[in-house]
Amino acid sequence: MSGTSKTLAWDDFRLIKAIAEARALPAAASLIGLNHSTVFRRLGQIEDGLGLKLFERHRSGYVPTPAGEEMVQLAGRLDEDITAFSRKLAGQEIQPAGELRVTTNDTLLVDLLTPVFAAFLQQCPEIRLDILLSNQALNLSKRDADVAIRATDNPPETLVGRRGARIAWALYGLADRFPPDADTSLDRLRDQNWISLGDQFAWLKAVRFLQDYVPPERIVYKVNTVLGLAEAVEAGIGIGFLPCFIADTKPALVRLAAPDPEFAADLWLLTHPDLRHSPRVRLFLDFMATEIGRMKPLIEGERAVAARG
């Protein structure tokens, strides 16, 4: 035996069990949803890490060695235990319950998340949601919140989570002021009245673009919330960049240009590493990821109508 050692994971046992049952790598790969080359490579890595052979290669197929047979038997016992535990969960003998604190901003809450939260509570009546609105990142290490739902391209390195979608932004104005044959090229729009987020949002690329491209006197209205930005465009104060998931649901508004990928931001579901295995947190994150996935076409600005200009 070589001097190398390997810490075995359940996936290793599962792979060895599949090979023993199938006696061939392609069939084993099919059993566990991997491709043949991956199974071949992982088997080699497991054997190299253990410093011994787990299978003899015969014409009739892969036959476990004594060490391989022992690993297969253990894999069978593990599989039975996992199946029994899954049944226990399915029977709701273990049921997540209690309060879950979620922080997000007002824009995401009002225009995207409230119906999703309602659906979650209907499915998980033993969990209570405490929603904290803030445009600042709360300290999840101090348990200010359990989960953060944020639009950012730079999530804090101290948090873990998953990217749900890419939030698209496009230029919008009132539909009755911009008929389909209107020239909405940016050069023609510079002299329009514009609406922008305040200078404190200069970290947003859409705000920086307006600062660089539009004459200051043409930016007639600034507001420090995206909710207010959308309301101002809808009220006819001027034109402005808005998240597509807000503007595309407003019949009075029309896109004046296609979404600019440079203005987009990621939508993240985040939690503290110590909380990611909490049943409540995992259940909530899985549910939110699924629902946000369903809304991706809206969030990412996909639509059949071609942009003008």
Image: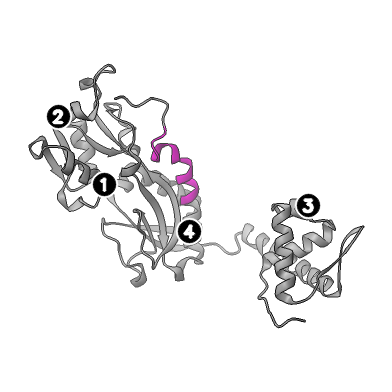
Q: Specify the amino acid type for callout 2.
A: Gln
Magenta residue span? 288-302
Q: Position of residue 297 (x, y in %)?
A: 44, 37
Q: Position of residue 22 (x, y in %)?
A: 83, 56
Question: Quadrant of the image for the N terminus?
Answer: bottom right
Earlier-in-chain disc, 3 versus 2: 3
Q: Are marks 3 and 1 in contact (CB under 8 Å)?
A: no
Q: Give the CA separation, mark 1 to mark 4.
A: 41 Å
Crowd rating for badge 2 (residues with CA inside 10 Å; few <14, some 14–19, many 20+): some
Q: Residue at x 75, y 77 (%)?
A: 51
Q: Give the CA separation, mark 2 to mark 1.
A: 20 Å
Q: Nearer the viewer, residue 130 or 239?
A: 239
Earlier-in-chain disc, 4 versus 2: 4
* Residue ID for mark 1: 205
Depth check, mark 4 against mark 2: the one in front is 2
Above or below residue 6? Residue 174 is above
Q: Nearer the viewer, residue 11 or 47?
A: 47
Q: Residue at x 69, y 52 (%)?
A: 33
Earlier-in-chain disc, 4 versus 3: 3
Crowd rating for badge 4 (residues with CA inside 10 Å; few <14, some 14–19, many 20+): few
In the rendered picture of this protein, how many numbered marks are placed on residues?
A: 4
Earlier-in-chain disc, 1 versus 4: 4
Main structural element of the magenta stretch: helix, strand or loop?
helix
> Please, what secondary structure does the residue beneath circle 4 have?
loop
- Numbered label attached to residue 192: 2
Q: Position of residue 96 (x, y in %)?
A: 51, 62
Question: Quadrant of the image for the C terminus?
Answer: top left
